Amino acid sequence: MNSSPDAAHAPDRVDWAAYDAVLFDLDGVLTPTAEVHMRAWADMFDDFLSGHGGGDTSAYTERDYFDHVDGKPRYDGVRDFLASRGIDLPEGSPDDAPEADTVCGLGNRKNDAFNAVLERDGVAPFPGSVALLDHLRGLGTRLAVVSSSANAPAVLEAAGLADRFETVVDGRVASEQGLPGKPAPDTFLRAGEICGASPGRAVVVEDAVSGVRAGAAGGFGLVVGVDRGAGHDVLTDAGAHVVVPDLADLVPAAGSDGSPA
Ligand SMILES: O=P(O)(O)OC[C@H]1O[C@@H](O)[C@H](O)[C@@H](O)[C@@H]1O
């Protein structure tokens, strides 16, 4: 990138050819599934809070999602939200039944709700994101998905995007390899390594504050925030160099960078 951060990071000036790899978050970046996660979390927490005695049981809001849950691995989201309300539940274990009032039980309850919607409605990717993927494929850029979700492979499959990426570092891979989840940078660093790109030559694309923080903490060459509700300024403050409402805004016009759009 050139020396002036503002000019260098203006959406129409992103020089994709300056990077070896682009590391995409999935839910809310490539597919509208962040909304499905959001709905499933809200249904589960509404139900839980209405029947719980201690701590702050006031209504769960969209702000709670963005501040405490968005972009984090499943049980981290449950734990961080409950902590924000002063509610202490036993951790339990991933095998817990969805009815169990444990951190894992609540996470599993939400996961069942998420999968029911995915199965019922399917998912279509954001057209602007597909346009950017097409552009990057034309440039030969190496592409990865870095998602906190253990459901990432199923979502990619359902969206018809499974064959677009060289690697998928998802929630399951992270726990198998002992990698801390977002906002720690480790999952992005791992994907960059697999794609043979140093952090300075890789781009992180994220819609969640926790994910943007991970990109900033990893020292990536460019951190793109996609504002699907977290807020432009919030994403900028978390460390995004560029914030756009849709990735179509980052697809250069045909021929402007020597490649087809
Ligand atoms: O699908 P899983 O494994 O429960 O992952 C949870 C998280 O996955 C992320 O990709 C979403 O953006 C989060 O907001 C969500 O809570």
Image (tube, rainbow, N blue to C red):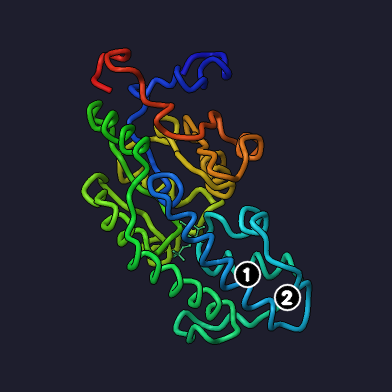
Q: Position of residue 197 (x, y in %)?
A: 35, 36
Residue at image position (45%, 39%) is: 205
Which quadrant of the figure has residue 42? bottom right
Comparing 63 with 16, the one in front is 63
x 53%, y 78%: residue: 104
**What is the secondary structure assignment of the residue under circle 2?**
loop
Q: In this view, does 217 lie to the left or right of 147?
A: right
Q: Distance between the residues labelled 2 and 1?
A: 9 Å
Residue 79 disc label? 1
Q: Nearer the viewer, residue 239 or 132?
A: 132
In the rendered structure, find residue 199 and report the number of the disc placed on it.
Answer: none
Residue 184 is situated, as x and y percent measured from the top left of the image, at 54, 52
Q: How many labels does the image show?
A: 2
Residue 234 screen position, x and y as percent: 65, 40
Residue highlighted by disc 2: 87
In the rendered image, the quadrant that contains the C terminus is top left
Q: Residue at x 36, y 38 (%)?
A: 129
